[in-house]
Image (cartoon, helix red, strand yellow):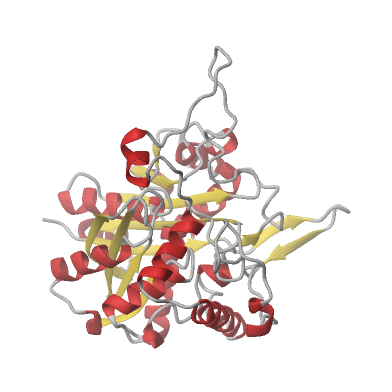
């Protein structure tokens, strides 16, 4: 059985809503990440056997097969294929896991996992909201009776699910806001110290006046925020405790990871940076829906034979503050090892991109601190979560 190694891991900065990246076509933004992933290690893209990409809202410029369109935008050979997958917010971490599994099975030797989402253009649920069939009738909601029967026929959105989590685990709004503040503080510190510099691809932006500039940092971080400012925000989603401040903001971004087998690394003279130890995926209550990282973490730790104490760096997606806080209630982590450079509340959560972006950040942080094992996990709409453990080599 082969092993799967990460040899290159890059991402664009995360652009804020209607910010610097909002005008990009998704295939062109993804193409930048794909090209950089191979160029950084001097790999001819002709070696890439397949590109697996995560995207949630697969319509318009993100539709058709975005991974294949990104391949062409990157200038890869015409015979390089691509496939788009959708596990909601866990899509691009699932792409990493799918690539690793094929390499471990011996089916492929060189693959790219990636993710891209331009939420400024394509809002969540845009693939069905207000769409019509050819006969003019509504296209219909993808959440069928089997799903809605669990909610008493009432649609529960993710913000409301986050509040249900807060209620179940006894998480106060003050605790959520404090977590959000810490996320911004950590992300700002990481920016000031240049911790993201190696993983970020500077993106050329054209200003309205025709001049150009380079975007080199994530745009959504708010170092000026405070507990007072967070406390003063209005609640959203019809909840009593969820605000824009303790939720992840609408953002845009792309990322890519080049994975190879051990034999391919030797053939191309590549230095492995991390080994995929194992991955897991779990389902969860579709109503509360965002609790999946709890069973997914337990599963992946059991499969790996590791304990959480063995993990030097955890990246858990901060879709809403109650998600990692409830995970923490159950797993009792060392919080200094969890999202040490901030998370999605500060950095943003371009949904189809986030899993791959978290893995890129996890790898670079392990290298910075010389840690051994890293864990990445995300909650997803519909009640699921992938989880992956890597080992720095």
Horizontal relation, residue 195 to residue 288: left or right: right
Q: Is residue 319 above or below residue 89?
A: below
Image x and y of residue 322, in percent: 44, 70
Q: Residue furthest front?
A: 152
* Residue positioned 40% across, 75% down in the render: 325
Q: How many marks?
A: 0
* Residue positioned 42% across, 48% down in the render: 88
Q: Nearer the viewer, residue 52 or 244?
A: 244
Q: Is residue 200 above or below residue 368?
A: above
Residue 308 seen from this side: yes
Q: Nearer the viewer, residue 369 or 378?
A: 378
- Quarter of the image where the C terminus is located: bottom left
Q: Nearer the viewer, residue 334 or 130?
A: 130
Q: Is residue 382 above or below residue 290?
A: above
Image x and y of residue 91, in percent: 39, 50
* Residue positioned 46% across, 64% down in the render: 163
Horizontal relation, residue 156 to residue 7: left or right: right
For residue 296, what is the image quadrant?
A: bottom left
Residue 275 seen from this side: no
Image x and y of residue 235, in percent: 62, 65
Horizontal relation, residue 320 to residue 252: left or right: left
Horizontal relation, residue 109 to residue 232: left or right: left
Q: Nearer the viewer, residue 207 or 344?
A: 344
Q: Is residue 330 above or below residue 37?
A: below
Image x and y of residue 55, in percent: 47, 45
- Quarter of the image where the N terminus is located: bottom left
Q: Residue furthest top?
A: 135
């Amino acid at each position: 059985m082969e092993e799967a190694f990460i040899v290159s891991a890059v991402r664009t900065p995360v652009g804020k809503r209607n910010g610097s990246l909002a005008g990009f076509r998704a295939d062109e933004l993804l193409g930048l990440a794909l090209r950089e992933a191979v160029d950084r290690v001097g790999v001819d893209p002709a070696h890439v056997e397949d590109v697996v990409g995560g995207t949630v809202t697969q319509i318009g410029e993100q539709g058709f097969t975005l991974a294949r369109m990104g391949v062409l935008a990157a200038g890869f050979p015409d015979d390089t294929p691509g496939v788009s997958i959708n596990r909601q917010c866990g899509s691009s971490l699932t792409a990493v896991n799918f690539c690793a599994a094929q390499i471990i099975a011996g089916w492929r030797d060189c693959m790219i996992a990636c993710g891209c989402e331009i939420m400024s253009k394509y809002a969540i649920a845009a693939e069905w909201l207000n769409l019509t069939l050819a006969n003019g009738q509504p296209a219909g909601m993808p959440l069928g009776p089997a799903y809605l029967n669990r909610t008493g026929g009432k649609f529960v959105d993710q913000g409301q699910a986050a509040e249900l989590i807060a209620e179940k685990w006894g998480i106060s709004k003050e605790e959520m806001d404090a977590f959000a503040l810490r996320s911004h503080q950590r992300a700002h510190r990481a920016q000031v110290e240049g911790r993201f510099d190696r993983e970020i691809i500077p993106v050329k932006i054209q200003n309205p006046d025709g001049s150009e500039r380079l975007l080199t940092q994530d745009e959504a971080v708010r170092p000026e925020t405070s507990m007072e400012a967070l406390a003063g925000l209005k609640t959203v989603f019809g909840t009593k405790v969820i605000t824009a401040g303790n939720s992840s903001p609408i953002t845009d971004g792309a990322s890519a990871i080049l994975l190879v087998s051990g034999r391919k690394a030797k053939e191309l003279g590549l230095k492995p940076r991390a080994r995929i130890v194992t991955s897991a995926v779990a389902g969860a209550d579709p109503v509360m829906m965002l609790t999946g990282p709890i069973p997914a973490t337990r599963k992946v730790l059991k499969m790996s034979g590791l304990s959480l104490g063995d993990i030097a760096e955890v990246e858990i997606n901060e879709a809403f503050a109650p998600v990692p806080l409830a995970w923490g209630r159950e797993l009792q982590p060392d919080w200094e090892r969890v999202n040490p450079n901030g998370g999605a509340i500060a950095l943003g959560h371009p949904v189809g991109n986030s899993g791959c972006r978290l893995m890129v950040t996890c790898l670079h942080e392990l290298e910075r601190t010389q840690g051994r094992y890293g864990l990445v996990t995300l909650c997803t709409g519909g009640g699921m979560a992938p989880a992956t453990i890597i080992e720095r080599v």
